[in-house]
Image (cartoon, coloured by chain):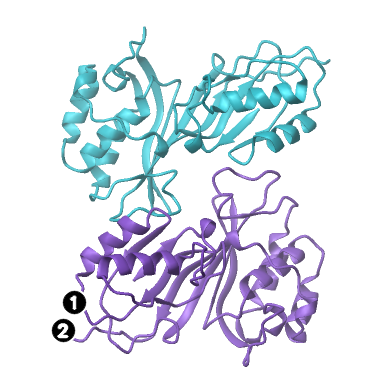
Chain colours: A purple, B cyan
């Protein structure tokens, strides 16, 4: 299934006791519909407050499933904050996380003196004027294969912190600045740490050269602050091969 | 002042006892800041659930006002659902409603099988596929001076139902269909009745010719249903002349 959700009211994807999470709500609805407990795996375990327009999730069941009815049931039980935009069968070997070949995230910033009542749930409000050109020069430097240790979460120690970035650029969408970044995969808090540091570049607290030096330094302690979660959205997950359902 | 507000949680602009309204919240904040009760007049009295990105409102006071501090105070007391984007002095003769020479409204429709968690507060979800070409042909026919009796609220009986429409067209913004209509002024429920009828054209319940006949007929009972309020937004109010503040 391809899922959209507004992360505002959830403690992230991953199921937790006594807290509303996206996985928890969906697994609860699946249990009601299927009469069976299943585990729902996702392409990316989004943090508390992070949104998704193209999260991919899958579960296994022995029971026959009518996908149209399943989609209708899920949207009736989980909406309006979570919507399954597509539901379909895949082969038994499909793993939404392991098999994903790239993820695309967007981070939205409202750069204006005052926040907007309309985008406040989905944009980080930065009131000081940002230098878009400097931010773009720093952003494009991320494209390619790099060790992203400088941008991982402080409590995270990935075995292999090298990631390949396919796309990294800013654009203007309506009144917002939108940072798009696509990569094979991301380290924990990587996008938010990159954005927090790019905003330092935009507000002249840090030069583009310093940003490039930071990437090379592989030292988390030198990066900027973590941008808040509500500006971040998992937009798309791509797969290299098709995972056709076996005929049932 | 130029105001943005998310109408979702308000019973419209106009002050009512025991119900949250935009005027009520703003007048309460003004009383706190100024230490004085003032009446706030607006360019358009938006209905319950209707949003604004460019509402214009004004009040009179004998007291000296620091506009920067007033804006900061209003946004601290009224936010995040209401934001004053601009605050400035105008002359004593300024009347935001009477002096307005045109208003621009937008109506958003999400035309997709399922709603979106992100636009559900600001778009009407229409799941049946709409014929955009037919809707556009009907929309452009509204440009010019017409008697809009067919599209006024059933309980409304305007003395002069003639209005001049400057702009009336559809466009695609992201995944939404957006209807923009600018006119000297609007009859009560006029935009929502026009949109409800245009959606009938888009879904082949009514031909473009029938729509044109309806406009000419000046008969409210033949129009389509009133589109829901949450898709509507007052985007801009224009004034022909400047209302400079008198030097104080």
SS at mark 1 in the image: loop
Tell whether B19 sits left or right of A145.
Answer: left
Dot 1 falls on which chain? Answer: A
Choose the circle earlier in sequence order: 1 or 2.
1
- From the top left corner, tell me how far across and down residue B126 is, in percent: 29, 46
Looking at the picture, how far across and down is residue B215, in whole percent? 24, 23
**Labelled disc at residue A64:** 1
Eyeballing the image, is A219 above or below B110? below
- How far is mark 1 from mark 2, CA to CA? 9 Å
Q: In the depicted view, which residue is nearer to us: A62 or B150?
A: A62
Give the crowd class for mark 2: few <14, some 14-19, many >=20 residues within 10 Å: few
**Do the CB atoms of the residues marked 1 and 2 lie less than 8 Å apart?**
yes
Of tags 1 and 2, the one toward the viewer is 1
The residue labelled by disc 2 is A248
* Residue that appears at 18% across and 77% down: A64
Q: Nearer the viewer, residue A236 or A178?
A: A236
In terms of image quadrants, where is residue A101?
bottom left
Placement of the C terminus of chain A among the 4 image quadrants: bottom left
Quadrant housing the N terminus of chain A: bottom left
């Amino acid at each position: 299934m391809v899922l959209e959700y507004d992360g505002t009211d959830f403690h992230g994807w991953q199921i937790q006791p006594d807290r509303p999470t996206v996985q928890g709500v969906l697994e609860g609805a699946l249990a009601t519909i299927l009469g069976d407990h299943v585990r729902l795996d996702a392409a990316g375990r989004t943090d508390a407050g992070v949104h998704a327009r193209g999260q991919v999730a899958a579960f296994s069941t022995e029971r026959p499933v009518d996908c149209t009815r399943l989609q209708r049931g899920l949207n009736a039980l989980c909406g309006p904050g979570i919507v399954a935009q597509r539901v379909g069968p895949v082969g038994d070997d499909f793993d939404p996380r392991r098999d994903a070949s790239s993820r695309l995230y967007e981070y939205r910033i409202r750069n204006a003196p005052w926040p907007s009542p309309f985008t406040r749930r989905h944009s980080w409000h930065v009131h000081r004027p940002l230098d878009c050109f400097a931010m773009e020069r720093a952003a494009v430097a991320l494209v390619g294969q790099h060790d992203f240790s400088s941008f991982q979460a402080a409590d995270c120690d990935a075995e292999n912190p090298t990631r390949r970035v396919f796309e990294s650029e800013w654009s203007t969408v309506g009144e917002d600045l939108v940072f798009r970044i696509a990569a094979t995969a991301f380290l924990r808090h990587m996008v938010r740490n990159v954005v927090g540091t790019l905003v330092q570049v935009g507000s002249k607290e840090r030069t583009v050269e310093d940003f490039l030096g930071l990437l090379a330094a592989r030292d988390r302690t030198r990066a900027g602050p973590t941008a808040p979660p509500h500006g971040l959205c998992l937009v798309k997950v791509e797969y290299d091969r098709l995972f056709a359902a076996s005929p049932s």
